[in-house]
Image (cartoon, rainbow, N blue to C red):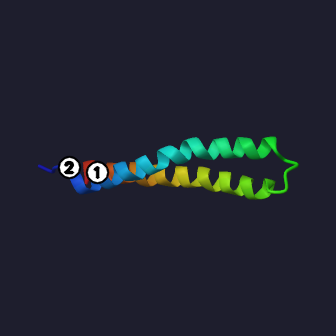
Amino acid sequence: MKHTNKELLGKGIKYLAGALPLTLIGPSVLYSAFNNQNHPLYIVVLIVGALACIGAIFLMYKGINTLIKSLFD
């Protein structure tokens, strides 16, 4: 009978914990960027917000994938 790999489970939870702040920060930064389109740093703030959103999606994917591996492999 297989057991849960606790080290991998902890790693997956860390990935998901890292994704949580990015899921809140990314859309907020994007919203701020779109509200201030006349500001000279508009492009920079837009890129930072987009990278935060992409990072959140990536960390969620890695976290869920790691959790599934720890539970079922």
Q: Quadrant of the C terminus?
A: bottom left
Residue beneath disc 2? 4
Using the image as rendered, state which of residue 40 and residue 1 is in the foreground.
40
Q: Is residue 10 left or right of residue 52?
A: left
Secondary-structure class at tag 1: helix
Amino acid bearing label 1? Leu
- The percent position of residue 36, horizontal first and vertical second, equals 82, 45
User: For numbered disc 2, what is the local secondary structure?
Assistant: loop
Outermost residue toward the right? 38
Q: Position of residue 42 (x, y in %)?
A: 80, 53
On the picture, is 67 further left or further right than 18?
left
Residue of label 1: 9
Q: Is residue 9 left or right of residue 20?
A: left
Mark 2, Cα crowd under 10 Å, few <14 / some 14-19 / many 20+, is: some
Q: Which mark is residue 40?
A: none
Q: Residue at x 55, y 55 (%)?
A: 55
The residue sitting at 85% across, 56% down in the picture is 40
Instruction: Tell me the mark number nearer the camera, choosing from 1 and 2.
Output: 1
Give the alpha-carbon distance from disc 1 to disc 2, as whole Å.
Answer: 8 Å
Q: Are marks 1 and 2 in contact (CB under 8 Å)?
A: yes
Q: Name the residue rendered at 43%, 55% in the picture.
A: 62
Q: Residue 25 at what x, y percent from top left? A: 59, 45
Amino acid type indicated by mark 2: Thr
Percent position (x, y) of residue 59?
48, 53
The residue sitting at the left extreme is: 1
Task: Point out the tag, 1 or 2, that comes first from the N-terminus.
Answer: 2
Number of numbered callouts drawn: 2
Taking depth in this image into account, of 29 and 73 the one nearest to the observer is: 29
* Residue at image point 16% right, 49% down: 3
Q: Residues within 10 Å of mark 1 (few under 14, many from 20)?
A: some
